[in-house]
Image (cartoon, rainbow, N blue to C red):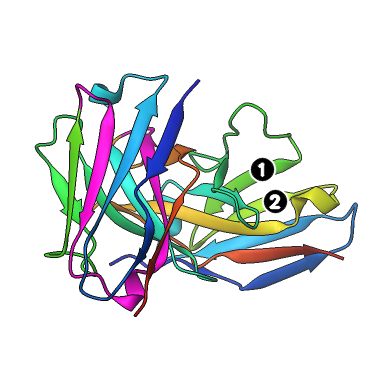
Amino acid sequence: EVQLVESGGGLVKPGESLRLSCAASGFTFSGSIMHWIRQAPGKGLEWVSSISSSGSYIYYADSVKGRFTISRDNAQNSLFLQMNSLRGEDTAVYYCAREDGYRYKGYFQHWGQGIPVTVSS
Amino acid sequence: SYVLTQAPSVSVAPGQTARITCVGDKIGSQTVHWYQQKPGQAPVLVVYDDNDRPSGIPDRVSGSNSGSSATLTITRVEAGDEAEYYCQVWDATNDRPTFGGGTKLTVL
């Protein structure tokens, strides 16, 4: 059974940092493209970042570029999101998700349970 | 970037048919996926590749895609179908997924 379990969320002040982790199991993590997707309170889904199976290809939404860093440890079946210079608008539930389907037509059948991040003074 | 537009809300009576649309430029040439999200839960994939269903999704749920809109259709609507529904395509230019704004389905 595919499982994705996020951790590391919490309450931080503006300008502070936080590191999210996503522990994967039940599938070949090293062969999977992984994503972070977030959802602000009462809002829709917003893609944040993605990383290729090897970690060679990384993409970010403009809203987080230069502040967030995605990484992975295939030996530990783990995905990470280092979030620096956090802002109030980064307040959201953060999901890790595995990309499925054909390249450039992908979808997300497997999501973590989500981890809340609150940025407030 | 590619924009997907969904109506904020749709209401239907139990037993009736709900149709949730997703509008985008030439979306018929894209591959559309749909998610159901209930409060406090992670999204659940209900339709992928325009009209395929993951295992466990009832055949009351179907998708179609043509021209400038894609549609998620739920027949014989039940109280348990009440949720937010999101469409999603792949923005190949920027190599990232794009989500619609979501449609709240209310079962009267």
Q: Are marks 2 and 1 in contact (CB under 8 Å)?
A: yes
Calculate the distance from the C-alpha at mark 2 to the C-alpha at mark 1. Answer: 5 Å
Kindly indicate whether the residues beneath marks 2 and 1 are on one polypeptide chain: yes
x and y, in percent, of residue B11 in the image: 78, 68
Going by the numbered disc 1, the residue's amino acid type is Ser
Q: Nearer the viewer, residue B5 or B42?
A: B42
Q: Which mark is residue B62?
A: 1
Going 32% across and 19% down the picture, which residue do you hit? A28
Q: Is residue A86 part of the magenta span, yes or no?
A: yes
Q: Which mark is residue B73?
A: 2
x and y, in percent, of residue A100 in the image: 38, 33
Picture layout, residue A1 above or below residue A6: above
Q: What span is in magenta?
A: A74-102
* Figure quadrant of the C terminus of chain B: bottom right
A66 relative position to B93: left or right: left
Which chain is home to disc 1? B
Going 63% across and 60% down the picture, which residue do you hit? B84
**Does residue A84 appear in the picture of this structure?**
yes
Which chain is home to disc 2? B
Tag 1 secondary structure: strand
**Does residue B95 appear in the picture of this structure?**
no
Going by the numbered disc 2, the residue's amino acid type is Thr
Badge 1, how many Cα within 10 Å: few under 14, some, many 20+?
A: many
Picture layout, residue B80 above or below residue B102: above
